[in-house]
Image (spheres, grey):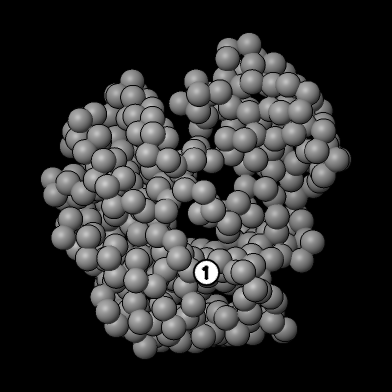
Amino acid sequence: MTPRSAYVHVPFCRHHCGYCNFTLVAGRDDLIAAYLEALAKELSWLEVPHEVDTLFFGGGTPTHLPPKELAQLFELAKRWFPLAPGYELSVEANPIDLNHARCEVLKKAGVTRISLGVQSFGAEKLQSLERDHRQPEILAAYDNARKFSQSVSLDLIFAAPGESLPQWEQDLKAAINLQPDHVSTYGLTFERGTSFWGRLNRGELARAEEETEGQMYELAIDLLAAAGYEHYEVSNFARPGHRCRHNEAYWTGRPYFAAGPGAARYIGGRREMNHRSTTTYIQRVLSSQSPVAESEELSPKDHAHERLVFALRRLEGISPPEFEKETGFSVEQLVAEPLAKFIAQGLFAQSNDNLRLTRRGLLVSDALWPAFLTPDS
């Protein structure tokens, strides 16, 4: 299949939040011009433009770029990834960046979807997460995004250090009150290599209790459902017609292009990831060397395993007969033993036409997937 989706990674941020393990550089705006030059060269290696249905700019913080460079980024990406009719063009944004000048660039570029990295509405929690915005900036950014974007999504983090269930409820209600089109909720994770990881190991931070984190997740499910949001993927909720189509391409196993430092692509059965260092990425590309740091040819069976895991993150689950028809492997061939155990534990519900996570399974889903990615012995 020829990819119909493309991802462009923009690594620049105002500062590096302590929990973040994404590919980024903070305080290195001096690299922006070289990054755009390298990106232009990497994309030129495609040789011909490829029309896409979804184009996603992530980071880092794409909206950290000054308006002129932001416009240059869109022009460059759309030259190589022209947009098909009915396209989705998504941009991740930091609330503090969405001023009038940048919004004019986003509007002119035809952005249809803004993913706003709110994380919380509470000043104390935002400070603990090392975010550089507060509620007034969130409200201003939301209003600005609403003026041009067809869809606005809010990202929220729960289980922050010291956070209580009532505090999380306040965040959810504040988000719902804005009536966004989409909400993503993520439990705080402590990733190796981040400053939060070091603080955790030094005893300066503590993880939320597992029971509390579960209660927070269930509260999000209940409040968002009551407000009319469809829970369509483990972490994602949408009003009708506002699912993230780009992410659904990932979850349903479709191929995709990608460019920029740390960007991962899947084309023709091969998965590649560019070097995560922005400076190394720039140096390699500008010297006409491949930026690829990791490359793997997935066997049909390995791809079927991965596709099964991503598809089962979606609340509607899968149709086992359709899955077998599309991948050449039955679910039983891939995961018979762990699936039987998880069904017996009430974590999955299965019928002839459907296999899906139960609510109980949703609460522990991240712990289930490793068993599905390791072939049965």
Q: Is residue 329 left or right of residue 234?
A: right
Q: Nearer the viewer, residue 25 or 184?
A: 184
Q: Position of residue 330 (x, y in %)?
A: 82, 31
Q: Nearer the viewer, residue 15 or 90?
A: 90
Quadrant of the drawing holding the N terminus: bottom right
- Rendering quarter of residue 141: bottom left
Total labels drawn: 1
**242 up-or-down from 370: above or below:** below
**25 up-or-down from 80: above or below:** above
Q: Amino acid at mark 1?
A: Leu
Q: Position of residue 74 (x, y in %)?
A: 49, 81
Within-10-Å neighbours for mark 1: few <14, some 14–19, many 20+: many
Q: Nearer the viewer, residue 24 or 48?
A: 48
Residue shown at 42% from the left, 40% from the top: 228
Residue shown at 52% from the left, 69% from the top: 89
Residue shown at 58% from the left, 14% from the top: 346
